Image (tube, coloured by chain):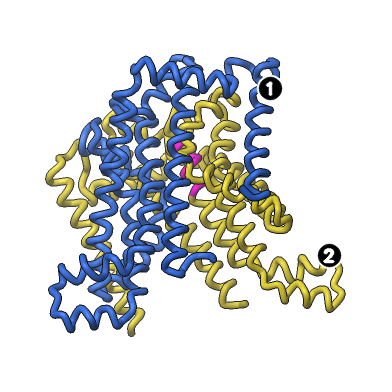
Chain colours: A blue, B yellow
Amino acid sequence: MNRVGRLRLAVIALAVGALELACRTGLIDHHVLIAPSEMAVALWRLLVSGQANEQILRTFGIIVLAVLIAVVLGFAIGLVIHALPRLRQALDPFFATYYAVPIFIFYPVMISIFGLSSIPIVLIGVATAIVAMIMATLNGLDRIPRVLTKVARVHRMGPVETALRLKLPAAAPHLFTGVKLAVSYGFIAVIASEFILAPAGLGRLISDAYTDFNNPRMYALMLLLVIVATAVNMALHVFDQRWAERRGIGKP
Amino acid sequence: MIAGKRAADTVIILVVMLLAWQALHQVAGETALPGPLPTLAYLVHFVPTERFMQNAAATLLTFFYALILSYVLGLAIGIWMGIHRLSGAVGEPILISIYTLPKITLYPVVLLIFGLSQSGRVTFGAMHGVLPVALLTMNAIRNIPRVYLKTARTLRLSTWQTIATVLVPATLPEIVAGLRIGFTLTLLGVLLAEMFASKYGLGSLIINAMQILQTKEMVSVTIVLFVFAALANAALLWLEHKLHRRV
C-alpha cells in the first residue's frame, strides 16, 4: 500500500478512535451515540441471534431485483431510443431534468396506487436507477466504432443478434458505469422507501428501533448498511477502473 | 424551424405522459390516483390556501438554510482539497464512499442530536448537498491547466489577484455544476427529513395527505415540487452553459 493509502487508513482509524474515546469518556451522551465497538458487538449479536436475518435478506433481495430490472430494461430502452434519433431528441430535456427532481417524492403516489407492499419499493428503486442505465447505454452506443456496425451488416446479423453479440460487448465499459450508478441509486431508493413507510425490511427495522429508543439495535443495523454499501461500491469502483484501463478509456 | 419541431416533439411526449396518467387513473380507480384534470383543478384551488402557503414557506426556509450550509461547507472542503493535493488524494475516496451511502439511515442520529427541530432538518438537508459541491469543486480546481498558474506567476499577480482573475473564472462553470447537483440533493434531503417524523413542510403534507387518502392533495404537492425542482435546475443549467460558452 502506498503512502496515501496508509494515510487514509490512519485518518479513518483516528476518526473512529476519537469517536470511541468521546463515547467511552461520556463526552457524547450514551442516548445519542454509542461507541463504535459497542455497535460492532451489537451487530454481531444481532446477526448470530438471527432475529433480523429475514428482513435483511428481504431488503437485499428487493435491491437486487430492482437493479436487475433497471439494468435489463434500461439497456433495452436505451437500444430502442438510440435507434430513433427523433424520439431521443424529444426525450433529451426529460433526461436532463430527471435526476434534478427528487423522484423519491413519487413514492407516496405509488403506495396509493399499489398499496403498502414491496411493489412500490421495487418500482421506486427501478424508477431511480433506470434512467442512469438508459443514459449510459446511449453514451456507450454513441461510441461504438462505425466499422463494427458495418461488420454486422457484412455478416447479415439481425437486429437482436447485432444487439447481443456486437453492441452489448462493444459498449460494455460504458454500460458498466451505468450498472454502477444503478446499484448505488437503487440501494439508496429502496432503503429510503423502507425507512419512510414500508411493511417490513431493513430500513423499517432501523426506523422502528429509533422509535423504540433501542439504540444498540439501531446502530448495529446502521453499521451493517454502511459496511455493505461501502463494500459494494468499492468493489464496483475497482472493477470499473480495471475495465476502463483495459479498454484504454480510464486513467492510466 | 428545427427548434419548433423539437419543441413540438417535447409537447407530444408531455401529452403522452398525461394520457398515461389518465390510463393509470382508469385502472387504479379514483381513490388511488385521481385523473389529471381534477387534480390540476384541485392544485389551482389548493395552492393559494393558507395551509399550503405556510408549509411551502416552512420548506423554503429550511431549504434555504440547508442550501447555504451545504454551499459554504462544500466550497470550503472542495477548495481546500483541490489546492492541497495530499488532502485531496487522501480524502477523495472517503468522500465518495460517504456520497454513495444511503444517508437516510443516518437521520435518526441527526434526530437524536438535534431533536425534532428545524436545525435537524437543515443539517440533514446539508448532509446531502455538501458532498457533490465539495467533490466537483475539488475536481474543478485540480483540472486547471498548469499553464494558467504559470502565466499568473509570470505576470507577478498577487495571491488575491490570482484567485480573482485566474482561479475563479477558470473553475466557475464546473463549480456551478456542483452547486446545481447540490441544490437538487439538498432539496431531496430536506423533503426526506420532512417526510419522516415532522409536522411542518411540504414533505409532511404529502405523507399526511397519503395517510388520510387525500390523493388529490398528495399529487398536487408532488407536482408543485416537481415543477419547482425542474425550473430551478433549468435556470442553473442555463447559467452553466452560459459560463461554459464564455470561456
| Apparent side of residue B15 relative to residue B87 in the rendered image (left or right) | left
Write the residue at 50% across / 18% down: A41
| Apparent side of residue B66 relative to residue B211 in the rendered image (left or right) | right
Q: The residue under label 2 is which amino acid type? A: Thr
Do pointers 1 and 2 mark residues of a single chain?
no
Q: Which residue is mark 2?
A: B159
Judged from the image, the secondary structure of the residue bearing numbered disc 1 is: helix
Q: The residue under label 1 is which amino acid type? A: Ala
x, y (%) of residue B122?
57, 37
Question: Where's the C terminus of chain A, which quadrant?
Answer: bottom right
Write the residue at 48% across / 45% down: B100
Mark toward the viewer: 1 or 2: 1
Work out whether residue B228 can be spotted.
no
x, y (%) of residue B99?
52, 45
Q: Which residues are magenta?
A: B185-192
Front residue (pair B187, B144): B144
Q: Which residue is mark 1?
A: A22
Does A24 appear above or below A56? above
| Apparent side of residue A3 relative to residue A51 in the rendered image (left or right) | right
Chain letter of mark 1 equals A
Chain letter of mark 2 equals B
Q: For residue B186: magenta? A: yes
Write the residue at 41% across / 18% down: A46
x, y (%) of residue B192?
45, 37
Write the residue at 68% across / 22% down: A21
